[in-house]
Image (cartoon, grey):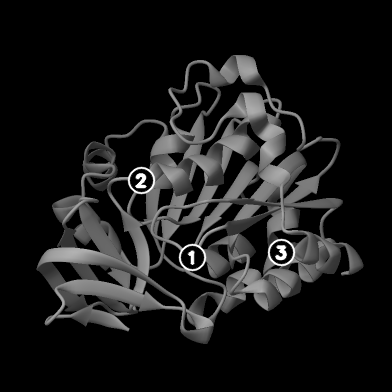
Amino acid sequence: MGYNEQERAFIEWYPRGYGVGFKVKERLFETQTRYQRLEIYETEGFGKLLVLDGTVQLVEVGEESYHEVLVHPVMLAHPNPRRVLVIGGGDGGTLREVLKHETVEKAMMVEIDDGVVEASYIYLDVAKDLLDRLLKGEEPRAELIIGDGVKYLRESDGRFDVIIVDSTDPVGPAKLLFSEEFYRSAYEKLNEKGLYITQAGSVYLFTNELLDAYRAMKRVFDRVYYFSFPVIGYASPWSFLVGVKGDIDFRKVDTRRAEKLGLYYYDPERHETLFQMPKYVRDLLERA
């Protein structure tokens, strides 16, 4: 796993020998932060590549295929999302999409690793202007908190309409973010009507992790939805899980609000296509 200097390529290996790779022009930056190994590469065709602990986080060309789908389905399904919490997302792409919604009065981003924020601000063209305003405390509708999202959610007195978890894969250090205990904290911090969303890994290669997270969420939320989307840079299709609190139908979104968003990958007019899942995976989820 990682950078192959002879091939001038970065390859992330998934279970069973499946890999996702990018041809690389050069390695721009590498460091060991307090929490993880961080690398940034210039690729041949997809702009810069952000890697954490050997796993692809995003490439600049196509990052919207992840960020749009993580954010806008829940934002458009909620009738009036005013307060939003983002856990993780240090590159700023998720918060950037959240702030496209005029209803948002306050958005909090809690990122554990300030090294990710700093490197993203310096090297990536994902949300540079937004990160600049956040670091200077000049973004009126959003606030950056460097800290543990699990602890923040457990101890915060705030209430939110939407909670978005933009984390690494549901294995290793991020596993706490996929625990029943964490889901219960999230449920308690949602308002009477609220939505929670998390990415849940590769449909084909992290199926067991998807099932485990789905079962845990089903024990907590009033309703749980699953969907998938082809994300550039990941072992697609990539899965997402949505937890509902209160009377919200996640299968319906406000397409009128979507008209102002300028979306490129997620199509609110075809929202129902998100729910397509391979039959054997759907059968496993329904039995769960």
- Residue receiving disc 3: 183
- Residue receiving disc 1: 235
- Residue 193 percent location from the top left of the image: 78, 38
Q: Quadrant of residue 1?
A: bottom left
Local crowd at mark 2 within 10 Å, few (<14), some, or many (≥20)? some
Residue occupying the point 59% across, 30% down? 82
Front residue of 228 and 126: 228
Q: Quadrant of residue 234?
A: bottom left
- Residue 139 percent location from the top left of the image: 32, 34
Kind of residue indicated by mark 2: Gly
Frontmost of labels 3 and 2 is 2
**Mark 2 element type:** loop
Local crowd at mark 3 within 10 Å, few (<14), some, or many (≥20)? many
User: Could you tell which of marks 3 and 1 lies nearer the N-terminus?
Assistant: 3
Q: Left or right? Give the position of 236 relative to 224.
A: left
Frontmost of labels 3 and 1 is 1
- Residue receiving disc 2: 62
- Residue 258 percent location from the top left of the image: 56, 21
Alpha carbon distance from label 3 to label 1:
25 Å
Residue occupying the point 42% across, 65% down? 147
**Mark 1 element type:** loop
- Residue 271 percent location from the top left of the image: 67, 33
Residue occupying the point 47% across, 52% down? 231
